[in-house]
Amino acid sequence: MKSEQNEVPMVVIKRLPRYYRYLGELMKQGVNRISSAALSEKMGVTASQIRQDFNCFGGFGQQGYGYNVPNLYAEIGEILGLNHGYSLIIIGAGNMGHALVNYANLEKRGFKVIGIFDNDAKKIGTTIKGIVVSDISKLEDFCKQNIVDIAALSLPRSEVRDIAKRLISAGIKGLWNFSYTEIAVPDDVAIENVHLSDSLMTLSYKITKINEN
C-alpha cells in the first residue's frame, strides 16, 4: 500500500526496519497473523504507536483480524525499497570495509557489493570475498561502466569530503557514511550517517539510569 502523505516523519521511517526484522522472525516461526497488541509486546512499542506508524502509509490491518504477517512484511520491504536490488561499492578496504563486505545481511536485504576501492598500494589488488580491491583513481571509470546506487564510506575523515564530491559528481545518489564526519550533500542525494559510538553512548546512559535506581 502506497503512502497517502507526501512527507512521512523520519522517526517513523527509522522504525520500519525494526518492524521488518520482527515480522521476518515471526514468519520463520510460522506466524501468519498478529494483532497490534501482540506486536507491541514483542517490540516494546505501544499498540497505538504501531497503528499510527502504519497509518502513515494508509494502514495495513483489518479490524478484528489484525495484520497478515507475510503481506505486511512484503509491504514494508517495498516501502523501504528492498525490492530494487541496489548495487553498492565500498570506499576503504580497512577493518570496517572488510566487515561490510562480509556482512551477510547486505545480500539478504537485496544489496549487492560490486566494487571495493582504496588508495593503499598494499591493499590494491587483494581480494575480499571474491571482490578485487581497486585503485581509488579508477573510481569514476568504474561508475561509468557500472550501475552504482550506493557508496559506503569507510575511510579517514581527512579524505571523506573529497571522495564524497567525486562520488556525487559520478552520479551516485546514496551515501552510507561511516567516517564519523557529517557531509553536506545536494537535495537529490541521500545520505545516512552511521555513528556506532552514539549507540554505545545511549547504552551507557541506560546503564547509568539503571544503576541510579
Image: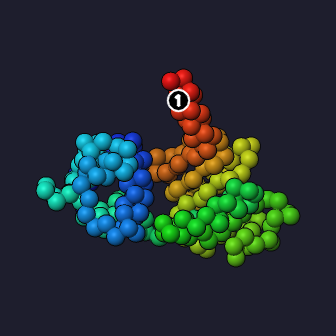
Seen in the picture, residue 212 relative to 111 is either above or below; the reply is above
Figure check: 68 above or below 41: below
Residue type, label 1 = Ile
Q: Nearer the viewer, residue 167 or 9?
A: 9
- How packed mark 1 is, by other alpha carbons closer than 10 Å (few <14, some 14-19, many 20 or more), is few
| Left or right of 193, for residue 125 | right
Colour theme: rainbow
134 or 154: which is nearer to us? Answer: 154
Whether residue 38 is visible here, answered yes or no, is yes
**Which residue occupies the foreground of this view, 23 or 185?**
23
Residue 128 position (above or below residue 196): below
Q: How many marks?
A: 1
Q: Which residue is mark 1?
A: 210
**Residue pictured at 70% horizontal, 76% vertical:** 130
- Residue at the right extreme? 122
Q: Give the answer, above or below, for where 92 lies relative to 144.
A: above
Query: What percent of the width, then of the height, locates residue 209?
Result: 52, 27
Residue 172, picture quadrant = bottom right
Q: Residue lying farthest bottom?
A: 130
Residue drawn 59% across the image and 73% down it:
146
Residue 198 image position (x, y, % from top left): 59, 38
Question: At 33% from the left edge and 48% from the top edge, which residue is drawn?
Answer: 41
What's the residue at 52%, 49% (across, down)? 191
Q: Is residue 165 visible?
A: no
Q: Residue furthest left?
A: 64
Q: Secondary structure at mark 1?
A: helix
Image x and y of residue 119, in percent: 79, 59
Q: Quadrant of the N terminus?
A: bottom left
Q: Is residue 65 left or right of residue 83?
A: left
Residue 139 picture location, percent across and down: 68, 64
Q: Is residue 32 left or right of residue 43?
A: left
